[in-house]
Image (cartoon, rainbow, N blue to C red):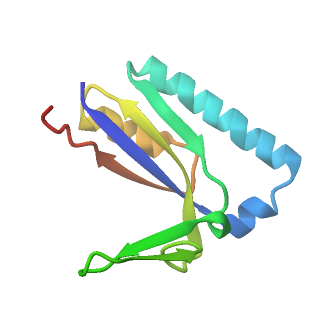
Amino acid sequence: MPRFMYVIAVDEAAMADATPEQMEGMMQAHSDWAKAVADAGATILAGDPLAPSTTATTIRHGADGSAVVTDGPFAETKEALGGYYILECADGDVALALAKSLPAGTVELRPIVDLPS
């Protein structure tokens, strides 16, 4: 069965200002979505929220093979990578329908490439 990655971008300032009740509502929305995933015959293989982008370390590889390490995210943006899911779905149509119902600000959906073993 094909696998898909759901990359979730969030407004970190809004997340930082969320009340405990808002966070609880967000968690409940994700639990409800997980039930919808199962009802659609898909399987969540993995999924986690991520720490704020201020905790990120970025490694840039140069053409000469060097690696430059910097603190912070790859790019300065209003939205930052907030979490992800990896799902196994029947096909891209099911994956897209589930992405549309994911309770998150911005979702980038990508098929996972199966590499030969």
- Name the quarter where the N terminus is drawn: top left
In which quarter of the view is residue 98 placed? top left
- Residue at 21 percent across and 43 percent down: it is 113
Q: Position of residue 95 (x, y in %)?
A: 34, 37
Q: Position of residue 3 (x, y in %)?
A: 30, 34
Q: Nearer the viewer, residue 60 or 12?
A: 60
Q: How many marks?
A: 0
- Residue at 38 percent across and 43 percent down: it is 5
Q: Position of residue 114 (x, y in %)?
A: 19, 37
Q: Is residue 98 left or right of residue 24?
A: left
In which quarter of the view is residue 59 placed? bottom left
**Position of 21 relative to 18 (above/below):** above
Q: Residue furthest right?
A: 20
Q: Is residue 86 left or right of residue 17?
A: left
Q: Is residue 31 left or right of residue 84?
A: right
- Residue at 56 percent across and 32 percent down: it is 33
**Position of 106 relative to 13 (above/below):** above
- Name the quarter where the C terminus is drawn: top left
Q: Position of residue 80 (x, y in %)?
A: 56, 66
**Position of 110 relative to 40 (above/below):** below
**Position of 91 relative to 7 (above/below):** above
Q: Residue furthest left?
A: 116
- Residue at 39 percent across and 23 percent down: it is 42
